[in-house]
Image (tube, rainbow, N blue to C red):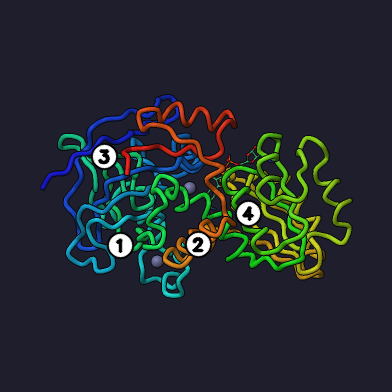
Amino acid sequence: MTITARAAICRGQDHPFAIEDVRLDSLRADEVLVRIVACGICHTDLAVRDRQLPVPLPIVLGHEGAGIVEQVGSGVTSIKPGDRVIMSFNSCGHCPSCEIDAPTYCYEFFPNNWSGVRPDGSPTLFQGDAPMNGNFFGQSSFATHAIAHERNAVVVPEDAADLPLERLAPLGCGLMTGAGAVLRAMKVRAGLPIAIVGAGTVGIAAVMAAKIAGADPIIAVDVHDSRLELAKELGATHVFNAKDDAMGRIRDLCPKGLGYAFDTTGINKVIEDLFALLAPKGVLGMVGASAPTDMLAFNEAEFMGSGRTVMGILGGDSDLDGFIPEMIRYHQQGRFPFDRLIRYFDFDAINEAIEASERGEVVKPVLRMAAA
Ligand SMILES: NC(=O)c1ccc[n+]([C@@H]2O[C@H](COP(=O)([O-])OP(=O)(O)OC[C@H]3O[C@@H](n4cnc5c(N)ncnc54)[C@H](O)[C@@H]3O)[C@@H](O)[C@H]2O)c1
Ligand SMILES: [Zn+2]
Ligand SMILES: [Zn+2]
């Protein structure tokens, strides 16, 4: 059966996203066909548009999709038609990282997420008879329908049946990255200070998770006062504007040093300044996209002598089947009110949604493909 979908085609920085018809390939054994209800827009989609990442264009982007399964491939056992699913990044399932349930560090990350096609080179999408790049993060969810995989689609738990999919969509990347960095990767301990730089989706998710972990104080830094206000409402005990000597104010507040520092800006100077603020055994986690040529410099004696850790983190170290339901439980308990970050846009308004987020007016834009 041929499935056609409306999909937003990304042709690069100089072109608005264009909603056009695409045809989906028939399903392989491990794949699922999802009717997309909503998809969050993440900074990484825009990094691809701007050619900061080695992903081929034109392409159908979107990697925070949520929807309803319409068909499953012959080998799929854990998902059935009618299931409500949240999609995230894909992984191979058999490399050394996948074997220890660390799929964000899959040895085959590129072919499974960023190559524009399946790992075997076959396209998932077509326009007319010509292949169109897709399979972005194993989904390409800026579309009314997407092909995803059993490994990267997580069924929403039954006790969360009342939660709308359009709210849950951004759990698959930005929220998972910030919350997982704090709870899974850095394993933040109660009572120790944390500073989080950048109060976008990832940073504010980290603030909410730091509160869950019991960190104290929880310091958020950004250049937008509106984002700092939101961070304060959602768990930050102190907020500093980066334009106002934030690093000096952190040093004054925590003279013994930071137990944890988390950078979401990818700015070299910010990361090095945070390193200098770490306490003995302090952990610096970093997730922000940076220029491919950027290099960091740390003092070796400080690094070794006080037992510091500098940690690159992808996808919040999440095991999808464990951490996505865990975040939903925190949300149900009122401890992870990420809905406060979201503003919804119709799918047709994708370019307006991107512009609003780039102006800093909306933290997490979510596109609505269909009501459900
Ligand atoms: N490693 C991963 O797995 C992963 C996953 C998702 C996103 N990311 C990356 O993480 C980063 C953050 O994502 P996001 O969605 O939260 O982006 P975002 O743009 O919403 O947030 C970044 C925030 O940093 C602030 N900022 C910029 N310069 C600053 C400075 N000098 N000092 C303080 N704050 C500053 C901005 O005002 C903004 O609020 C992006 O680079 C994104 O590509 C990484
Ligand atoms: Zn793998
Ligand atoms: Zn993302």
Residue 334 seen from this side:
yes
- Decide if residue 111 is in sight here: no
- Give residue 348's mark: none
Tell me whether the residue at label 3 lies in contact with that at label 2, contact meaning CB atoms closer than 8 angstroms.
no
Tell me residue 278's x, y (percent): 79, 60
If you read the primary sequence from the N terminus, does the residue marked by circle 1 or circle 3 appear first? 3
From the viewer's perspective, is residue 12 above or below residue 160? above
User: Which structural element holds mark 2?
Assistant: helix
- The residue pinned by badge 2 equals 329
- Which numbered tag is attached to residue 132? 3
Q: Left or right of 215: which side holds 103?
A: left
Q: Which mark is residue 150?
A: 1
Left or right, 219 with reference to 95: right
Q: How far, Cα to Cα, is label 4 from label 2?
A: 14 Å
Looking at the rendering, the quadrant in which ligand 1 lies is top right
How far apart, in angstroms, are the residues tagged by discs 1 and 4?
29 Å
Residue 216 or residue 264, whichever sits in front: 216
Q: Nearer the N terminus, badge 3 or badge 2?
A: 3
Label 4 sits on residue = 208
